[in-house]
Structures are given as structure tokens and as C-alpha cells.
Image (tube, grey):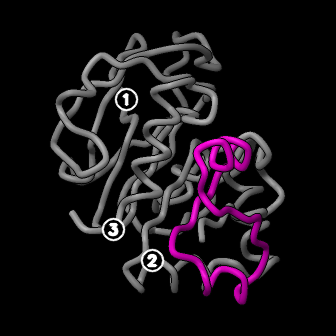
Amino acid sequence: MIGILDYGMGNLSSVFNSLEYLGFETKIVRNLDEIEGLTHLIVPGVGSFSKAMNNLEERDLIPAIINHIDSGKPYLGICLGMQLLATMGYEGQKSKGLGLIEGEIIPFEANIQVPHVGWNNINCSRNHPLINNNANHIDFYFVHSYHFDVKNKGDILTVTDYEITFTSIVGKNNIIGVQFHPEKSQDPGLKFLESFCEWDGQC
């Protein structure tokens, strides 16, 4: 069972509809009990980092996320759901993240037009079961004003150029996070979601 986490910060329906289209058994989950029975957890999100972390804390969802990841089951963070993996974020106000991948969520430099909206390609930094060198120069759809400044370069799977080079996919063990929106990225996005749903979390 694939679960999409509802924590009040996401366009859940587009992710849900994409997975249903692909034929995967999917449900929206909102609490620990529902998350415990999943094989895969997807955390999408649109909005402020600090508000998102506050929502997770208020709804007591952080232990459920950690338990899922500690069990070795696959986790996918989409856009804000990827950024929440970081140690710290500065959108809204300075806030601690989940701390699962070391780094900070920082704004683009002042001279760069934000939000970054539209299609951009990815360039692979290292191989991963969900992404490999064959994915170089495939376009995905982005909408964001902050990006992940990753501390350990080994956690970076792909980068993308938008006046500067920023991290577009992170990966560590059974965790993967994407800055783009696969559910809005047509065939390449559907293929990525399908690969995630078929992934066993092993690298």
C-alpha cells in the first residue's frame, strides 16, 4: 500500500491521481496507525518550511515518519516534502527540519528570478536504483523559491542549472527527495513515480 501524507501542506489529489492512473493501491494517510501499515510513504508539499514543520509537530506525525524510515521502507519527499528532510530551513522563519539529510534550505540569491517555475533538466551526480545516467537532460517541472544546500555531496543524486546549480534530487539509504513535481512532469514524472512505487528501498 502506497500512502500519501496529509499534513495540511500539499496538493495531494494530483499525486493520488497519478498513482491511481499507474495502477498502484494508494490512500491518503493522516496518523501513526495508518502510516504503520504502508509499504511506501510519499510526503508532498507546497508552502512554507516553518509552517510545514509546525503542522507535523502539532499532528504528532514526526515519530510516524521516522518509524517508517527506520523500518527500511521507502520514503519519497516531493518539493517541500524533500526540503523537510534537511537539518534547518529559513522559509517563514528559522526552523529545525527532520534532520534526516544534513543541510539547509536557503533562498536563491537576490539576483535570481523567483519563484523558479517551469521545465528544467537534471544531471546525475551518482547512480541510484531510481535514477541513473540515462536520466541526464530529462526535463521535470519545478516550482520553488528555496533550494537544498546539502552538506554531504554523497547525498546528492542530481543537480539542475537555474542561473546557479542547485540540488534537484537527494538520496540516502531508503530516503529519496525531489525538488521538482513528478506528478506534474508528464511521462518522465509518471515513470519516476512508478519506479519509486516498485522500489524496495535498497541501494
Q: Earlier in the sequence, mark 3 or mark 2?
A: 2
Between 149 and 80, the residue placed more toward the observer is 80
> What residue is shown with label 2?
69
Q: Residue 178: within the magenta?
A: no
Between 163 and 201, the residue placed more toward the observer is 201
Task: Give x and y (percent) for residue 107.
Answer: 55, 32
Instruction: Write the residue at 46% across / 62% down.
Output: 87
Secondary structure at numbered mark 1: strand
Q: Report whether 38 appears left or right of 46.
A: left
- The amino acid sitting under disc 1 is Phe
> What residue is shown with label 3?
201
- Give the position of the N terminus as an image quadrant: bottom right
Q: Badge 3, how many Cα within 10 Å: few under 14, some, many 20+?
A: many
- The amino acid sitting under disc 2 is Ile
Q: CA distance from mark 1 to mark 3?
A: 25 Å
Q: CA distance from mark 3 to mark 2?
A: 10 Å
> What residue is shown with label 1?
166
Q: Residue 27: within the magenta?
A: yes
- The amino acid sitting under disc 3 is Gly
Q: Earlier in the sequence, mark 1 or mark 3?
A: 1
Q: Report whether 8 appears left or right of 191.
A: right
Cβ–Cβ below 8 Å for labels 1 and 2? no
